[in-house]
Amino acid sequence: MPRIFAIDWDRREVRGLLISSGPTGTSVAGAWAASLTTADPAGLSGKQIGARLAAAISGQVSGKVITLVGVGRDNVQMQLLALPPAPADELPELVRFQADRDFTALGNEAALDYIPISGDAQTPNQVLAVALNAAGVAEAREVCEALGVEPNRIPLRAFASASLVHRAGPIDPDHIALVVNPLTDEADLTVQAGDKVVLMRTVRLPDPGQAESRQRALVGEIRRTMAAVRQQLANRKVEQVIVCGTRDTFDPGGVLTEELEVPVTAFDPSAQAPSGLAAHGVPADNLARFAAVLGMALGEADRRPPIVDFANVRRKAERRQFGRVHALAAAAAVVAGLWFVTHLWRQLASPTRELAEIEAEIASQQSQMERYVALTNQATSIDRWLATDVNWLDELEQFARRVRPQPLTDKNFPVNDDVVVTQVRMSRASGTDAVGGQLDLQAKAKSDAAVRDLEQRLRDGQHLVMPGRLQRDNSVPGYSRSLDLQIRIVPASEDEQASEGPS
């Protein structure tokens, strides 16, 4: 009977789940939640996180286990890539080549995987590339080393919680659904169309003790995610919102449904767990955050690989050598092909003249259509250019005012929450149906609070802030944090422009 050990964590809590799966069913063999509270502003290292969980487990996990480590968004980069038509087995190399150009500081030690969205060997491909940097890979392995296990799979935490919801069945396969998994000080938001992931975000939240402001902040992030879906999927939109947790942690009542204008339901992860979960003494508040570990463990028990697995990334399949069996199969195919060609020639001999007349008529119609191809291509090119035509001078002015709303000479200037921008890169949005543009920001901050305040100032209805790398960095005296932010500039819709009126 295989045993499956799933681990995930956020900045304040680490969670572990051990299940036993066999022909007679699945049961929970152990469940733990340990605090990661620390006075160190940089947080705990991977070894320290593993040690906290190991202390809670107290040797209850031993022997052979299949270990899954769910990683968060901090060390993950995501990019929507547009690729030329190619067979599925050639996509891994195309994704790697394009990611080396589009991702910042990917490196040889990073793990790169992707989610196919559309396309095939005849039509352009679109994939969501997901990379776990070297620091994230090392952190996952350090957590496992402290627990005395080896990571067999490294999925993305947000995808794991969405997988549990999809497995339980509340997602309508004909609708776009938003799965929200609130944790202690952050939340994962995953958008799914059936069983396909369309968009994923991780956002920071106020302290759990601030229930009203925490719910208000989460509702705001849900709205921004729904707006991003409308821009990315053109005419489609989110039609249901599913919030993981109990009604004590987040109440999706009728008021919230009316406010978001879509059905909002609560999803209790512990209600989907195998027997025995409640017997291990984990408080109900902590069990409400077990969606990711349950999704990983039950997916492995069902032998369904995760959507993204940084321990087993997609690679080009090795071609087998041509042997005797292949030679016999090729010979049989040649014989069958010759017979088919002979039979087809006999069938087509009589209507050859009629076919030639039809082909001549088609050629005549095509020659008439070709006169309009150039005009159509020009119009299409202009539309695509206008969709990504961002007034960068206005954007830079607005960006500068939001980074520092008060001048340095102001006597009330918040010195302790200052942020220094070291690099800004502006680019048009990529993709066939791209709109707007993108700002990639690198900066130094004095504290985590300064980072949160900067994200709030930069974010509005037309600016989606995607947090990136955040780490301790003392290269600039007084500024102990180094961060990356990606700001997606989304033009206002025609209805929004009309409501705002002339400027």
Image (cartoon, rainbow, N blue to C red):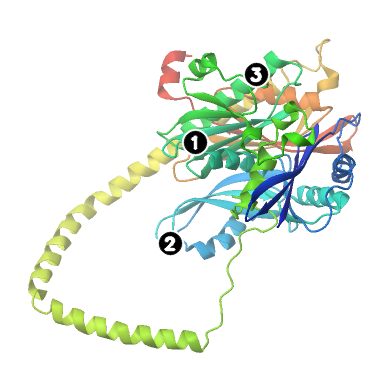
Give the structural element (helix, strand or loop) at label 2. loop
Residue 103 visible in rendering? no
How crowded is the residue under tag 2: few (<14 C-alpha within 10 Å), some, or many (20+)? few
Which residue lies under the disc numbered 2?
Answer: 121
User: Left or right of 314: which side holds 338?
Assistant: left
Q: Amino acid at mark 1?
A: Ile
Per the model, the C-alpha gap separating discs 3 and 1 is 23 Å
Front position in the image: 237 or 150: 150
In front: label 2 or label 1: 1
Give the structural element (helix, strand or loop) at label 1. loop
User: Left or right of 81: which side holds 273?
Assistant: right
Residue 215 got which mark? Answer: 3
User: Left or right of 61: which side holds 274?
Assistant: left
Give the structural element (helix, strand or loop) at label 3. helix
* Residues marked 3 and 2 touching at CB (< 8 Å): no
Q: Amino acid at mark 2?
A: Ala
Front position in the image: 159 or 379: 159
Q: Position of residue 460 (x, y in %)?
A: 59, 22
User: Going from the N terminus, do you reach mark 2 or mark 1 first?
Assistant: 2
Compared to 63, does 328 lie above or below? below
Residue 205 visible in rendering? yes
User: Going from the N terminus, do you reach mark 3 or mark 2 first?
Assistant: 2
How crowded is the residue under tag 1: few (<14 C-alpha within 10 Å), some, or many (20+)? many
How crowded is the residue under tag 3: few (<14 C-alpha within 10 Å), some, or many (20+)? some
In front: label 3 or label 2: 3
Compared to 19, does 425 lie above or below? above
Q: Amino acid at mark 3?
A: Gln
Quadrant (top left/top right/bottom left/bottom right) for the N terminus: bottom right
Q: Position of residue 79 (x, y in %)?
A: 59, 45
Q: Position of residue 402 (x, y in %)?
A: 68, 21
Which residue lies under the disc numbered 1?
Answer: 171
Q: Residue at x 24, y 82 (%)?
A: 341
